[in-house]
Image (spheres, helix red, strand yellow):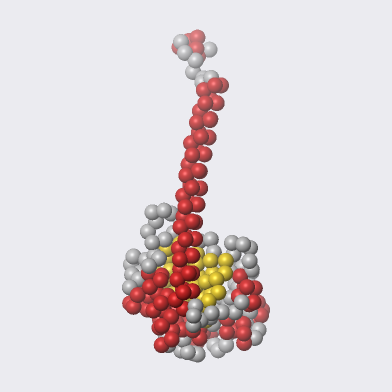
Amino acid sequence: MLKDRFGFNFWPSFTDLMLSFILVVLIVLFVVSKMIAAGTENLERARQSQQQIQTQIEQGIGGKYKVVTLSDRDGSDINREMTNRQADVYIIDKLDRQTITFSDKVLFDSGESYVKPAGYDILNIVGPILANNLDNIGEIQIQGHADISFEDDFNLQLAANRAIAVYKFLQVNVGIDPAKYLMSATSFGKYKPVGRESGSDYDYGKLQSANANEALMARNRRIEIVLFYKNQKNNG
């Protein structure tokens, strides 16, 4: 026996093992509770920012344009809600992001990529609202979308130019600095109609169905400003 030869018992007792195990479990529970608390705090801050942006946009342009706010937190089918509650501007709240969707006719004339005067009026209201709520926002994406009319290259370029026009407005006119607040402009062309989610099973037949009539095509011609909220308290 090791105890007989060296004068001590090399193997820890069962009590020592149990105490060590309990200590490890307590440490893990403490860390997990801190992570949950931080995540809950971040989600609450994101919800507060979403509410502020929603309220301010509704107050700013709601008298002239129909603004509808939707959320998937209550299990609502956002695509169906957008069909039933047609609007000029949608504000869509999700767990970690908020999407402000503008009908193309709100910001641009048909087939054009220059923001029209009425569009500038809207962006002059919405832009500062975003700028005043950047503390909890980690990334801004301006996404251009089109319907299936015309050639792919035309739709892709038109949607890109429109997204860039909004990007430049936020950068130059509003003063949102992409070096400080990550901001991008991209074009999906015709390939991301309303209702299509990343990673979903999709094909050309579904794309045609999503553009089956003029009302659906008009809904797909849009600009989206997607606000991704920070997931860490001190992120950014």
Q: In which image quadrant can residue 211 be found?
A: bottom right
Q: Is residue 161 visible?
A: no
Side of 54 where 86 appears, left or right: right
Residue at 35% x, 75% y: name it. 174
Q: From the viewer's perspective, is residue 126 above or below residue 151? A: above
**In front here: 28 or 102?**
102
**In front here: 49 or 186?**
49
Tell me residue 199's x, y (percent): 59, 66
Residue at 62% x, 62% y: name it. 74
**In front here: 93 or 208?**
93
Locate the C terminus and report the quarter of the image it occupies: bottom left
Tell me residue 172's x, y (percent): 33, 77
Q: Is residue 124 visible?
A: yes
Q: From the viewer's perspective, is residue 42 above or below residue 69? A: above
Give the total number of marks visible in the rendering. Answer: 0
Residue at 42% x, 63% y: name it. 137
Tell me residue 231's x, y (percent): 46, 56
Residue at 43% x, 54% y: name it. 232
Tell me residue 70's x, y (percent): 57, 69
Q: From the viewer's perspective, is residue 8 above or below residue 76? A: above
